[in-house]
Amino acid sequence: MESLAPDHFSPGTTYLDTAASGLIPTGAAAAMAASVAAASEGRPQEEVFSAAVEAARAACGRLLGVPAGRVAAGSSVAVYCGLIAQSLPAGSEVLVAEGDFSSLVNPFHVRPGLRVRTVPLERIAEEVRPGTALVAVSAVQSADGRIADLDAIGAAARAHGARTLIDVSQAAGWLPVDAAAHDYTACVGYKWLMCPRGTAFLTVPEDLGGLVPVFAGWVSGEDPWESCYGRVEPMAASARRFDENVPVFSYVAARESLRLVESLGVERVGAYDVALADRFRVGVARLGHAPVEAAGSAIVAVPGLGGAAERLATQGVHVSARAGRLRAAFHLYNTAADVDRLLEAL
């Protein structure tokens, strides 16, 4: 079972930790290095950077099913969640899942005047009630790979007039996501999309979702190069008004990484990733361990084995330890042999 893209990666270890950080394709790394070299020599890079950001924005939109005008380019999910938190009226109730990723939930906890209610992931849909302003939940749980019932959550939110914010950081790139079905989605690019750190995206509704561009700088203008001094006006009419002044070298690489994901197709990648994860689930069960129930997920968490992660790393097998569990995450550059090596090492 060869990897889906053997010519695009050159791993030096058995790397099964995409849920922490994905491998960067060799072509993306080369493009980034070339851009850094050009900048070190004083060659103009503005047009290269602008084209890279716009290409990454458009590619992210296609992968998530929305036009580029609904995608903001940034560097942090926490920043975008903070933007949404700051835009909510005082007294708003925000519904979140127990143990969800801190970058998603913490911005709502630290914003004064919000009421954050935390419930088990499986009860999110039934816990939406009149007065709930926002449901904020990850599509796939970082700690253990459980997949949220986004259809039920979306239906419950619409029934009660609540907006939805879905963190797709652990989904985008392998699990098909329809951002158009939600008010907001946010994701980092450095996991399953295999971009460098410093890449993140926010999708918003056509009406921009009532968000206040609280960190608007010159890149938020309709014509950024005419918005360098004084008040920025007019603001961009699209989601670009929520852009950050991004780490542009990362976006040069991101353009290539996203191009690879698009060429392979999310459905194909997802089927491949889940097949590897299922192979591990069966194998680790034969060793006497019971993984967290997360059917259809590319992430497998095994209680009681978290302490093995450090030992495995010394053998060149890289996984994570999360919440006392061993967490393995399988992606397109992995093979059946990688799964078997992990099982043998365990």
Image (tube, grey):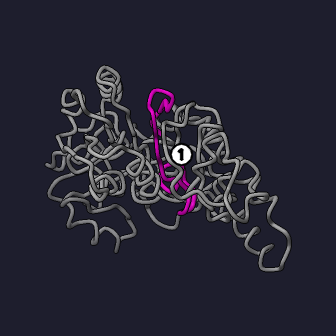
- According to the picture, the residue beneath numbered tag 1 turns out to be 2
**Compared with residue 156, is residue 55 higher up or lower down, i.e. above or below?**
below
Residue at figure coordinates x 28%, y 41% from the top left: 92
Q: Along the line of sight, which residue is nearer the eye, 34 or 72?
A: 72
State the residue in front, 303 or 322: 322
- Taking the view exactly as shown, the residue that stands out farthest to the right is 43
Residue range corresponding to the magenta coloring: 174-201
- The amino acid type found where label 1 is placed reads Glu
Residue 8: quadrant of the picture? bottom right
Q: Position of residue 300 (x, y in %)?
A: 29, 47
Name the residue at the bottom extreme. Answer: 41
Horizontal arrangement in the rendering, residue 58 relative to residue 342 (left or right): right
Where is residue 102? Give x, y as percent. Answer: 31, 57
Task: Classify mark 1: helix, strand or loop.
Answer: loop
User: What residue is at 35 percent from the left and 43 percent from the top?
Assistant: 89
Q: Where in the figure is residue 243, as x and y percent of width and height?
A: 60, 53
Q: Main secondary structure of the magenta part?
A: loop
Residue sitting at 33 percent across and 30 percent down? Answer: 162
Quarter occupied by the C terminus: bottom left
Graded by Cα atoms within 10 Å as few (under 14), some (14 to 19) or many (20 or more), the crowding at tag 1 reads few
In the image: residue 6, left or right of residue 86: right
Horizontal side of residue 156 vs 15, given as left or right: left
Residue 59, by quadrant, is top right
* For residue 22, side relative to residue 130 (left or right): right
Q: Is residue 94 visible?
A: no
Q: Nearer the viewer, residue 286 or 266?
A: 266
Residue 214: x and y in percent read 51, 55
